[in-house]
Amino acid sequence: MTTIRLLIVDDHPVVRTGLRHLFETEPGFSVTAEAADGLAAVEAVARDAPDIVLMDLQMPVMNGVDAIRKIRALPSAPPVLVLTTYDSDAQILSAVEAGAAGYLLKDAPRETLFAAVRSAVAGGAPLAPTVAARLLHRLGGAGAAQEPLTARELDVVRLVAQGASNREIARDLRISEATVKTHLLHIFAKLGVADRTSAVTTALERGLIELPRG
Protein backbone atom coordinates (compact mmCIF):
# COMPACT_ATOMS: atom_id res chain seq x y z
CA MET A 1 0.00 0.00 0.00
CA THR A 2 1.34 3.43 -0.95
CA THR A 3 1.50 5.80 2.00
CA ILE A 4 -0.09 9.21 1.52
CA ARG A 5 2.06 11.97 3.03
CA LEU A 6 0.11 14.88 4.49
CA LEU A 7 0.84 18.45 5.47
CA ILE A 8 -1.59 19.67 8.15
CA VAL A 9 -2.21 23.43 8.21
CA ASP A 10 -4.18 24.95 11.10
CA ASP A 11 -3.43 27.75 13.54
CA HIS A 12 -4.78 25.74 16.50
CA PRO A 13 -2.19 23.34 17.98
CA VAL A 14 -4.90 21.11 19.45
CA VAL A 15 -6.48 20.65 16.02
CA ARG A 16 -3.13 19.83 14.41
CA THR A 17 -2.33 17.33 17.15
CA GLY A 18 -5.74 15.69 16.80
CA LEU A 19 -5.45 15.39 13.02
CA ARG A 20 -1.91 14.05 13.25
CA HIS A 21 -3.03 11.36 15.69
CA LEU A 22 -6.04 10.54 13.52
CA PHE A 23 -4.00 9.99 10.37
CA GLU A 24 -0.96 8.38 11.95
CA THR A 25 -3.12 5.69 13.54
CA GLU A 26 -4.73 4.85 10.17
CA PRO A 27 -2.79 2.61 7.77
CA GLY A 28 -1.77 4.27 4.53
CA PHE A 29 -1.21 7.77 5.91
CA SER A 30 1.69 9.67 7.43
CA VAL A 31 2.02 13.32 8.48
CA THR A 32 5.16 14.79 6.98
CA ALA A 33 4.80 18.29 8.47
CA GLU A 34 2.55 20.81 10.20
CA ALA A 35 2.11 24.55 9.68
CA ALA A 36 0.35 27.17 11.79
CA ASP A 37 -0.29 29.73 9.04
CA GLY A 38 -0.53 30.02 5.28
CA LEU A 39 2.97 31.34 4.69
CA ALA A 40 4.50 28.47 6.69
CA ALA A 41 2.33 26.09 4.65
CA VAL A 42 3.73 27.36 1.35
CA GLU A 43 7.25 26.98 2.69
CA ALA A 44 6.51 23.46 3.98
CA VAL A 45 5.14 22.36 0.61
CA ALA A 46 8.28 23.57 -1.15
CA ARG A 47 10.49 21.92 1.47
CA ASP A 48 8.74 18.61 2.19
CA ALA A 49 6.79 17.87 -1.03
CA PRO A 50 3.72 16.30 0.65
CA ASP A 51 1.19 14.35 -1.40
CA ILE A 52 -1.68 16.50 -0.12
CA VAL A 53 -2.31 19.53 2.08
CA LEU A 54 -5.13 19.75 4.64
CA MET A 55 -5.81 23.48 4.85
CA ASP A 56 -7.75 25.61 7.30
CA LEU A 57 -8.95 28.97 5.99
CA GLN A 58 -8.88 31.51 8.82
CA MET A 59 -5.25 31.86 9.91
CA PRO A 60 -2.76 34.61 10.78
CA VAL A 61 0.10 35.87 8.55
CA MET A 62 -1.49 34.44 5.38
CA ASN A 63 -5.03 33.09 5.11
CA GLY A 64 -5.90 29.73 3.60
CA VAL A 65 -7.24 31.04 0.29
CA ASP A 66 -4.05 33.00 -0.44
CA ALA A 67 -1.96 30.01 0.62
CA ILE A 68 -3.91 27.71 -1.70
CA ARG A 69 -3.29 30.06 -4.60
CA LYS A 70 0.45 30.20 -3.90
CA ILE A 71 0.75 26.44 -3.36
CA ARG A 72 -1.07 25.64 -6.58
CA ALA A 73 1.37 27.89 -8.44
CA LEU A 74 4.35 25.83 -7.28
CA PRO A 75 5.93 23.22 -9.56
CA SER A 76 4.40 19.75 -9.01
CA ALA A 77 1.90 21.30 -6.60
CA PRO A 78 -0.01 18.82 -4.41
CA PRO A 79 -3.79 18.98 -4.14
CA VAL A 80 -5.12 21.11 -1.29
CA LEU A 81 -8.14 19.86 0.63
CA VAL A 82 -9.86 22.52 2.71
CA LEU A 83 -10.83 21.39 6.21
CA THR A 84 -12.56 24.17 8.06
CA THR A 85 -15.51 25.17 10.21
CA TYR A 86 -16.56 27.86 7.71
CA ASP A 87 -19.14 27.07 5.03
CA SER A 88 -20.17 30.51 3.78
CA ASP A 89 -20.74 30.83 0.05
CA ALA A 90 -17.96 33.39 -0.26
CA GLN A 91 -15.44 31.20 1.57
CA ILE A 92 -16.31 28.12 -0.49
CA LEU A 93 -16.17 29.85 -3.86
CA SER A 94 -12.97 31.71 -2.99
CA ALA A 95 -11.25 28.47 -1.98
CA VAL A 96 -12.44 26.61 -5.07
CA GLU A 97 -11.45 29.42 -7.40
CA ALA A 98 -8.00 29.54 -5.74
CA GLY A 99 -7.54 25.90 -6.72
CA ALA A 100 -8.73 23.81 -3.75
CA ALA A 101 -9.28 20.18 -4.71
CA GLY A 102 -12.16 19.79 -2.28
CA TYR A 103 -13.90 21.29 0.73
CA LEU A 104 -14.79 19.49 3.96
CA LEU A 105 -16.06 20.68 7.31
CA LYS A 106 -14.35 19.76 10.57
CA ASP A 107 -17.36 17.80 11.78
CA ALA A 108 -16.84 15.23 9.00
CA PRO A 109 -16.67 11.60 10.23
CA ARG A 110 -13.17 10.13 10.19
CA GLU A 111 -13.98 7.67 7.40
CA THR A 112 -15.33 10.52 5.27
CA LEU A 113 -12.11 12.45 5.86
CA PHE A 114 -9.92 9.47 4.96
CA ALA A 115 -11.95 8.82 1.80
CA ALA A 116 -11.80 12.50 0.82
CA VAL A 117 -8.01 12.60 1.16
CA ARG A 118 -7.63 9.47 -0.96
CA SER A 119 -10.03 10.90 -3.55
CA ALA A 120 -8.23 14.24 -3.76
CA VAL A 121 -4.83 12.56 -4.16
CA ALA A 122 -6.31 10.47 -6.99
CA GLY A 123 -7.57 13.61 -8.76
CA GLY A 124 -11.09 13.72 -7.35
CA ALA A 125 -13.01 16.71 -6.03
CA PRO A 126 -14.56 15.74 -2.69
CA LEU A 127 -17.14 18.12 -1.25
CA ALA A 128 -19.04 17.91 2.01
CA PRO A 129 -22.76 17.33 1.25
CA THR A 130 -23.74 20.65 2.81
CA VAL A 131 -21.04 22.43 0.81
CA ALA A 132 -22.18 20.79 -2.43
CA ALA A 133 -25.75 21.87 -1.70
CA ARG A 134 -24.67 25.45 -1.07
CA LEU A 135 -22.67 25.51 -4.29
CA LEU A 136 -25.61 24.18 -6.27
CA HIS A 137 -27.83 26.86 -4.76
CA ARG A 138 -25.25 29.62 -5.33
CA LEU A 139 -24.63 28.59 -8.92
CA GLY A 140 -28.28 28.36 -9.80
CA GLY A 141 -29.73 25.23 -8.22
CA ALA A 142 -32.69 23.59 -9.89
CA GLY A 143 -33.36 26.64 -12.00
CA ALA A 144 -30.01 26.25 -13.73
CA ALA A 145 -30.54 22.56 -14.39
CA GLN A 146 -32.33 23.37 -17.66
CA GLU A 147 -29.51 25.57 -18.93
CA PRO A 148 -27.46 23.75 -21.60
CA LEU A 149 -23.81 22.94 -21.06
CA THR A 150 -21.38 25.06 -23.05
CA ALA A 151 -19.04 23.45 -25.57
CA ARG A 152 -16.15 23.68 -23.13
CA GLU A 153 -18.25 22.20 -20.30
CA LEU A 154 -19.11 19.28 -22.59
CA ASP A 155 -15.41 18.82 -23.29
CA VAL A 156 -14.76 18.68 -19.55
CA VAL A 157 -17.50 16.18 -18.76
CA ARG A 158 -16.40 13.95 -21.66
CA LEU A 159 -12.90 13.81 -20.22
CA VAL A 160 -14.29 13.12 -16.76
CA ALA A 161 -16.25 10.22 -18.27
CA GLN A 162 -12.96 8.87 -19.64
CA GLY A 163 -11.49 8.91 -16.14
CA ALA A 164 -9.30 11.98 -16.53
CA SER A 165 -8.18 13.86 -13.42
CA ASN A 166 -8.46 17.64 -13.12
CA ARG A 167 -4.75 17.92 -13.94
CA GLU A 168 -5.14 15.78 -17.06
CA ILE A 169 -8.19 17.76 -18.17
CA ALA A 170 -6.28 21.02 -17.69
CA ARG A 171 -3.40 19.68 -19.76
CA ASP A 172 -5.61 18.36 -22.57
CA LEU A 173 -7.71 21.52 -22.80
CA ARG A 174 -4.78 23.85 -22.14
CA ILE A 175 -6.47 25.59 -19.23
CA SER A 176 -5.62 25.87 -15.53
CA GLU A 177 -6.80 23.36 -12.94
CA ALA A 178 -8.70 26.16 -11.21
CA THR A 179 -10.60 26.76 -14.46
CA VAL A 180 -11.36 23.04 -14.68
CA LYS A 181 -12.80 23.14 -11.16
CA THR A 182 -14.92 26.18 -12.03
CA HIS A 183 -16.26 24.38 -15.12
CA LEU A 184 -17.07 21.33 -12.98
CA LEU A 185 -19.00 23.42 -10.46
CA HIS A 186 -21.08 24.95 -13.25
CA ILE A 187 -21.64 21.50 -14.74
CA PHE A 188 -22.81 20.21 -11.35
CA ALA A 189 -25.21 23.12 -10.99
CA LYS A 190 -26.63 22.84 -14.50
CA LEU A 191 -27.15 19.08 -14.22
CA GLY A 192 -28.45 19.29 -10.66
CA VAL A 193 -25.80 16.95 -9.26
CA ALA A 194 -23.12 17.18 -6.57
CA ASP A 195 -20.22 15.06 -7.80
CA ARG A 196 -18.30 13.89 -10.86
CA THR A 197 -19.84 10.42 -11.05
CA SER A 198 -23.38 11.79 -10.99
CA ALA A 199 -22.44 14.39 -13.60
CA VAL A 200 -21.23 11.70 -15.99
CA THR A 201 -24.25 9.50 -15.33
CA THR A 202 -26.70 12.36 -15.89
CA ALA A 203 -24.89 13.57 -19.03
CA LEU A 204 -25.01 10.05 -20.47
CA GLU A 205 -28.69 9.63 -19.58
CA ARG A 206 -29.55 12.92 -21.29
CA GLY A 207 -27.52 12.04 -24.37
CA LEU A 208 -25.17 14.97 -23.90
CA ILE A 209 -22.08 12.76 -24.23
CA GLU A 210 -21.26 9.25 -25.35
CA LEU A 211 -18.65 6.92 -23.97
CA PRO A 212 -15.83 6.18 -26.43
CA ARG A 213 -16.30 2.92 -28.31
CA GLY A 214 -13.79 0.12 -28.21
Image (cartoon, rainbow, N blue to C red):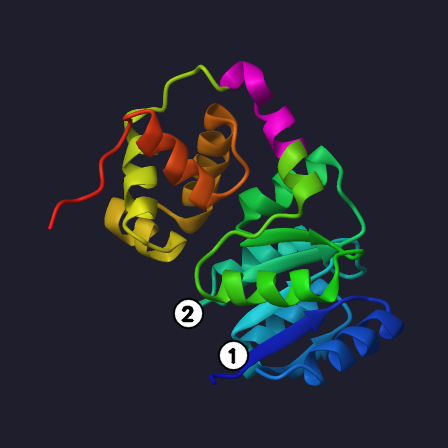
In terms of secondary structure, what is the magenta stretch mainly?
A: helix
Q: Secondary structure at mark 1?
A: loop
What residue is at 82 percent from the left and 78 percent from the top?
17
Frontmost residue, 207 versus 66: 207
70 or 175, which is in the foreground? Answer: 175
Which residues lie in the magenta part? Answer: 134-144
Residue 168 vs residue 60, the one in the foreground: 168
Tell me the CA gap for discs 2 and 1: 9 Å
Measured from the top left, where is residue 6 in percent x and y?
61, 76
State the image quarter where residue 211 is shown.
top left
Q: Quadrant of residue 18?
A: bottom right
Vertical arrangement, residue 72 with respect to residue 14, above or below: above
Q: Is residue 184 left or right of residue 55?
A: left
Image position, residue 121 (x, y; %): 49, 66
Query: Taking 163 as reference, is 74 above or below it?
Result: below
Left or right position of 120 against 169: right
Q: Is residue 192 above or below residue 122?
A: above
Q: Position of residue 162 (x, y in %)?
A: 27, 50
Residue 202 falls inside the magenta stretch? no
Numbered label tally: 2
Residue at the extreme front of the image, as rendered: 205
Q: Is residue 34 visible?
A: yes
Residue at position x 43%, y 37% in the image: 199
Determine which residue is flagged by label 2. Answer: 76
Q: Tell me if 188 is positioned left or right of 39 in this view.
A: left
Which residue type does callout 1 highlight? Ala
Residue 105 located left or right of residue 166: right
The residue beneath circle 1 is: 49
Contact flag, marks 2 and 1 (Cβ < 8 Å): yes
What's under tag 2, amino acid-wise?
Ser
Q: Secondary structure at mark 2?
A: loop
Horizontal and vertical percent position of residue 143: 55, 14
